[in-house]
Image (cartoon, rainbow, N blue to C red):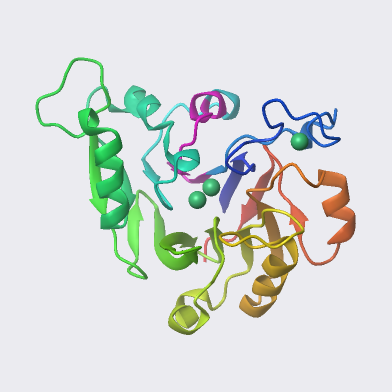
Amino acid sequence: MTEIEFLGTGTSHGVPVIACHCPVCSSSDPRDKRWRSSILIRRGGTSVVIDTGYEFRLQALRAGIDRLDGVLYTHAHSDHLMGLDDLRVFSRDHKFSIYSTAPVLKTIENVFPYAFRDWQYKGVPAIEAVAVEERKPFAVGEIEFVPIPVMHGMMRIVGYRFGKAAYITDVSDILYDENKEVLSGIDTLVIGALRERPHWSHFSFSQAVEAAGRIGARHVYFTHINHETGHNEIEERYRGRALPAYDTLKLEVADE
Ligand SMILES: [Zn+2]
Ligand SMILES: [Zn+2]
Ligand SMILES: [Zn+2]
Protein backbone atom coordinates (compact mmCIF):
# COMPACT_ATOMS: atom_id res chain seq x y z
CA MET A 1 0.00 0.00 0.00
CA THR A 2 1.02 3.58 -0.59
CA GLU A 3 0.01 6.27 1.89
CA ILE A 4 -0.65 9.88 0.97
CA GLU A 5 -0.77 12.60 3.59
CA PHE A 6 -1.90 16.09 2.66
CA LEU A 7 0.65 18.50 4.13
CA GLY A 8 -1.16 21.51 2.70
CA THR A 9 -4.26 22.10 0.56
CA GLY A 10 -4.40 25.88 0.20
CA THR A 11 -3.81 28.21 -2.71
CA SER A 12 -0.88 30.65 -2.85
CA HIS A 13 -2.23 32.92 -0.08
CA GLY A 14 -3.05 30.04 2.23
CA VAL A 15 -6.27 30.11 4.26
CA PRO A 16 -6.87 32.23 6.29
CA VAL A 17 -5.57 35.02 4.08
CA ILE A 18 -3.63 37.74 5.90
CA ALA A 19 -5.96 40.61 6.87
CA CYS A 20 -9.08 38.85 5.53
CA HIS A 21 -12.07 38.48 7.85
CA CYS A 22 -14.44 36.62 5.52
CA PRO A 23 -16.49 33.72 6.95
CA VAL A 24 -14.03 31.05 5.75
CA CYS A 25 -10.93 32.89 7.00
CA SER A 26 -12.74 33.34 10.36
CA SER A 27 -14.04 29.74 10.47
CA SER A 28 -13.27 27.63 13.54
CA ASP A 29 -13.35 24.39 11.50
CA PRO A 30 -9.72 23.12 11.42
CA ARG A 31 -10.34 21.92 7.84
CA ASP A 32 -10.65 25.57 6.82
CA LYS A 33 -7.00 26.18 7.80
CA ARG A 34 -5.15 25.51 4.59
CA TRP A 35 -1.38 25.71 4.36
CA ARG A 36 0.31 25.88 0.96
CA SER A 37 -0.29 22.76 -1.16
CA SER A 38 2.02 19.80 -0.73
CA ILE A 39 1.73 16.05 -0.15
CA LEU A 40 3.79 13.35 1.50
CA ILE A 41 3.84 9.94 -0.17
CA ARG A 42 5.07 6.88 1.73
CA ARG A 43 5.57 3.32 0.56
CA GLY A 44 7.61 0.79 2.55
CA GLY A 45 10.74 2.62 3.65
CA THR A 46 10.44 5.39 1.04
CA SER A 47 9.14 8.90 1.78
CA VAL A 48 8.73 11.54 -0.91
CA VAL A 49 7.25 15.04 -0.77
CA ILE A 50 5.79 16.92 -3.73
CA ASP A 51 6.50 20.68 -3.49
CA THR A 52 7.85 22.61 -0.50
CA GLY A 53 5.97 25.86 0.08
CA TYR A 54 6.45 28.45 2.80
CA GLU A 55 5.14 26.18 5.56
CA PHE A 56 7.33 23.18 4.73
CA ARG A 57 9.04 23.27 8.13
CA LEU A 58 5.73 23.39 10.00
CA GLN A 59 4.28 20.71 7.76
CA ALA A 60 7.27 18.39 8.25
CA LEU A 61 7.04 18.80 12.03
CA ARG A 62 3.27 18.26 12.06
CA ALA A 63 3.55 15.11 9.92
CA GLY A 64 6.56 13.81 11.87
CA ILE A 65 8.83 13.53 8.83
CA ASP A 66 12.11 12.09 10.12
CA ARG A 67 13.59 11.09 6.81
CA LEU A 68 12.98 11.97 3.20
CA ASP A 69 14.27 10.34 0.03
CA GLY A 70 13.51 13.17 -2.36
CA VAL A 71 11.31 16.12 -3.24
CA LEU A 72 9.47 16.40 -6.56
CA TYR A 73 8.55 19.85 -7.86
CA THR A 74 5.52 20.55 -10.03
CA HIS A 75 6.69 24.07 -10.93
CA ALA A 76 8.68 26.92 -9.44
CA HIS A 77 5.92 29.28 -8.25
CA SER A 78 6.91 30.50 -4.81
CA ASP A 79 3.99 28.86 -2.98
CA HIS A 80 5.40 25.50 -4.13
CA LEU A 81 9.08 26.26 -3.67
CA MET A 82 10.07 28.64 -0.90
CA GLY A 83 10.47 26.00 1.82
CA LEU A 84 13.44 24.44 -0.02
CA ASP A 85 15.99 25.88 2.40
CA ASP A 86 14.61 23.68 5.19
CA LEU A 87 15.67 20.58 3.25
CA ARG A 88 19.15 21.17 4.68
CA VAL A 89 18.43 18.86 7.62
CA PHE A 90 18.26 16.04 5.08
CA SER A 91 21.60 16.87 3.42
CA ARG A 92 23.93 16.67 6.40
CA ASP A 93 25.87 13.66 5.13
CA HIS A 94 24.93 13.40 1.46
CA LYS A 95 23.45 15.56 -1.26
CA PHE A 96 19.67 15.63 -1.17
CA SER A 97 17.93 14.95 -4.50
CA ILE A 98 15.17 17.07 -5.95
CA TYR A 99 13.37 16.13 -9.15
CA SER A 100 11.60 18.13 -11.83
CA THR A 101 11.80 19.05 -15.49
CA ALA A 102 14.93 20.92 -16.64
CA PRO A 103 13.28 24.38 -16.96
CA VAL A 104 11.82 24.17 -13.45
CA LEU A 105 15.18 23.07 -12.00
CA LYS A 106 16.88 25.98 -13.73
CA THR A 107 14.53 28.45 -12.06
CA ILE A 108 15.02 26.75 -8.70
CA GLU A 109 18.81 27.02 -9.08
CA ASN A 110 18.41 30.73 -9.82
CA VAL A 111 16.33 31.25 -6.67
CA PHE A 112 18.61 29.20 -4.38
CA PRO A 113 22.06 29.36 -6.05
CA TYR A 114 23.90 28.66 -2.77
CA ALA A 115 22.24 25.22 -2.45
CA PHE A 116 23.72 23.94 -5.70
CA ARG A 117 27.36 25.12 -5.55
CA ASP A 118 30.21 22.61 -5.37
CA TRP A 119 31.93 24.76 -2.79
CA GLN A 120 29.45 25.45 -0.06
CA TYR A 121 29.20 27.69 2.94
CA LYS A 122 28.79 25.50 6.03
CA GLY A 123 25.19 24.72 6.95
CA VAL A 124 23.46 25.50 3.67
CA PRO A 125 21.39 22.81 1.93
CA ALA A 126 23.42 20.58 -0.42
CA ILE A 127 21.02 19.79 -3.23
CA GLU A 128 21.39 17.65 -6.29
CA ALA A 129 18.99 18.55 -9.11
CA VAL A 130 17.79 15.52 -11.05
CA ALA A 131 16.10 16.34 -14.36
CA VAL A 132 13.13 14.18 -15.33
CA GLU A 133 11.29 14.04 -18.62
CA GLU A 134 7.60 14.33 -19.35
CA ARG A 135 5.89 10.92 -19.31
CA LYS A 136 9.20 9.07 -18.66
CA PRO A 137 9.01 6.97 -15.48
CA PHE A 138 11.68 7.40 -12.80
CA ALA A 139 12.13 5.88 -9.38
CA VAL A 140 12.73 7.43 -5.99
CA GLY A 141 13.46 4.55 -3.63
CA GLU A 142 10.59 2.08 -3.94
CA ILE A 143 8.21 4.44 -5.72
CA GLU A 144 7.97 4.92 -9.48
CA PHE A 145 6.71 8.28 -10.69
CA VAL A 146 5.66 9.50 -14.13
CA PRO A 147 5.62 13.27 -14.83
CA ILE A 148 2.35 14.35 -16.48
CA PRO A 149 2.65 17.61 -18.43
CA VAL A 150 -0.31 19.99 -17.99
CA MET A 151 -0.98 23.67 -18.63
CA HIS A 152 -1.15 26.15 -15.74
CA GLY A 153 -2.31 29.28 -17.56
CA MET A 154 0.47 29.92 -20.09
CA MET A 155 2.96 27.70 -18.27
CA ARG A 156 3.64 24.08 -19.03
CA ILE A 157 4.19 22.35 -15.68
CA VAL A 158 3.94 18.76 -14.41
CA GLY A 159 1.82 16.62 -12.17
CA TYR A 160 2.98 13.18 -11.05
CA ARG A 161 1.47 9.75 -11.37
CA PHE A 162 2.44 6.98 -8.95
CA GLY A 163 0.72 3.62 -9.31
CA LYS A 164 -3.00 4.24 -9.83
CA ALA A 165 -2.88 7.65 -8.18
CA ALA A 166 -1.96 11.07 -9.54
CA TYR A 167 -1.26 14.48 -8.03
CA ILE A 168 -2.04 17.29 -10.47
CA THR A 169 -2.22 20.76 -8.93
CA ASP A 170 -2.20 24.24 -10.50
CA VAL A 171 -3.82 23.09 -13.70
CA SER A 172 -6.03 24.76 -16.30
CA ASP A 173 -5.70 22.22 -19.13
CA ILE A 174 -5.03 18.47 -18.81
CA LEU A 175 -3.75 18.01 -22.41
CA TYR A 176 -5.82 14.84 -22.83
CA ASP A 177 -4.65 13.99 -26.32
CA GLU A 178 -0.95 13.83 -25.63
CA ASN A 179 -1.46 12.37 -22.13
CA LYS A 180 -3.93 9.66 -23.07
CA GLU A 181 -1.69 6.78 -22.07
CA VAL A 182 -0.30 8.22 -18.85
CA LEU A 183 -3.80 9.19 -17.67
CA SER A 184 -5.29 5.79 -18.33
CA GLY A 185 -6.15 3.73 -15.24
CA ILE A 186 -5.85 6.55 -12.69
CA ASP A 187 -8.15 5.59 -9.82
CA THR A 188 -7.33 8.24 -7.21
CA LEU A 189 -6.89 11.77 -8.49
CA VAL A 190 -5.75 14.73 -6.42
CA ILE A 191 -6.52 17.79 -8.50
CA GLY A 192 -6.09 21.52 -8.08
CA ALA A 193 -9.50 23.24 -7.81
CA LEU A 194 -9.26 26.87 -6.78
CA ARG A 195 -12.84 28.03 -6.26
CA GLU A 196 -16.33 28.01 -7.78
CA ARG A 197 -15.71 30.87 -10.23
CA PRO A 198 -13.46 30.34 -13.28
CA HIS A 199 -9.83 31.49 -13.17
CA TRP A 200 -7.39 31.81 -16.06
CA SER A 201 -4.69 29.53 -14.65
CA HIS A 202 -6.57 27.16 -12.32
CA PHE A 203 -9.53 24.81 -12.66
CA SER A 204 -12.72 25.79 -10.88
CA PHE A 205 -14.43 23.06 -8.82
CA SER A 206 -16.73 22.09 -11.69
CA GLN A 207 -13.91 22.08 -14.25
CA ALA A 208 -11.91 19.80 -11.95
CA VAL A 209 -14.89 17.44 -11.61
CA GLU A 210 -15.30 17.39 -15.36
CA ALA A 211 -11.60 16.62 -15.87
CA ALA A 212 -11.75 13.82 -13.29
CA GLY A 213 -14.75 12.36 -15.09
CA ARG A 214 -12.94 12.44 -18.39
CA ILE A 215 -9.92 10.73 -16.83
CA GLY A 216 -12.24 8.17 -15.22
CA ALA A 217 -10.92 8.55 -11.67
CA ARG A 218 -13.23 7.03 -9.04
CA HIS A 219 -11.77 8.86 -6.04
CA VAL A 220 -11.32 12.59 -6.55
CA TYR A 221 -9.84 15.06 -4.05
CA PHE A 222 -9.63 18.82 -4.52
CA THR A 223 -6.54 20.68 -3.35
CA HIS A 224 -5.09 24.22 -3.79
CA ILE A 225 -8.38 25.67 -2.54
CA ASN A 226 -8.86 29.37 -1.81
CA HIS A 227 -10.85 31.16 0.91
CA GLU A 228 -14.07 31.70 -1.03
CA THR A 229 -15.67 28.38 -0.07
CA GLY A 230 -15.54 26.51 3.24
CA HIS A 231 -14.81 22.80 3.56
CA ASN A 232 -18.39 21.87 4.51
CA GLU A 233 -19.90 23.78 1.65
CA ILE A 234 -17.63 22.14 -0.94
CA GLU A 235 -18.31 18.73 0.58
CA GLU A 236 -22.08 19.19 0.33
CA ARG A 237 -22.03 20.67 -3.14
CA TYR A 238 -19.81 18.02 -4.74
CA ARG A 239 -20.87 14.95 -2.75
CA GLY A 240 -20.58 11.79 -4.81
CA ARG A 241 -18.31 13.48 -7.35
CA ALA A 242 -15.35 14.81 -5.39
CA LEU A 243 -14.20 15.55 -1.86
CA PRO A 244 -12.29 18.58 -0.67
CA ALA A 245 -8.98 17.40 0.80
CA TYR A 246 -7.84 19.10 3.98
CA ASP A 247 -4.49 19.45 5.77
CA THR A 248 -3.48 16.22 7.63
CA LEU A 249 -5.92 14.01 5.65
CA LYS A 250 -4.40 10.59 5.00
CA LEU A 251 -5.38 8.21 2.20
CA GLU A 252 -4.28 4.74 1.21
CA VAL A 253 -3.93 4.04 -2.47
CA ALA A 254 -3.11 0.83 -4.33
CA ASP A 255 0.51 0.48 -5.46
CA GLU A 256 -0.34 -0.68 -8.96
ZN1 LIG B 1 0.17 27.22 -6.53
ZN1 LIG C 1 -10.95 35.25 3.48
ZN1 LIG D 1 1.31 27.95 -9.66
Q: Is residue 228 something that shows in the picture? A: yes
Q: Is residue 95 something that shows in the picture? A: no
The mark tally for this picture is 0
Q: Is residue 42 magenta?
A: yes
Q: Is residue 183 magenta?
A: no
- Asked if residue 154 lies left or right of residue 26, the reply is left
- For the point 56% across and 66% down, the residue is 172
Which of the two residues, 198 or 188, is positioned nearer the viewer here?
198
Quarter holding residue 30:
top right
**Vertical comparison of 256 with 37: above or below:** below
- For the point 66% across and 77% down, the residue is 216
**Vertical comparison of 18 with 235: above or below:** above
Residue 236 drawn at (x, y percent) = 90, 55
Residue 39 drawn at (x, y percent) = 55, 44
Which of the two residues, 165 or 214, is positioned nearer the viewer here?
214
Residue stretch in magenta: 40-60
> Looking at the image, which residue sits at the far top?
122
- For the point 80% across and 47% down, the residue is 229
- For the point 73% across and 54% down, the residue is 195
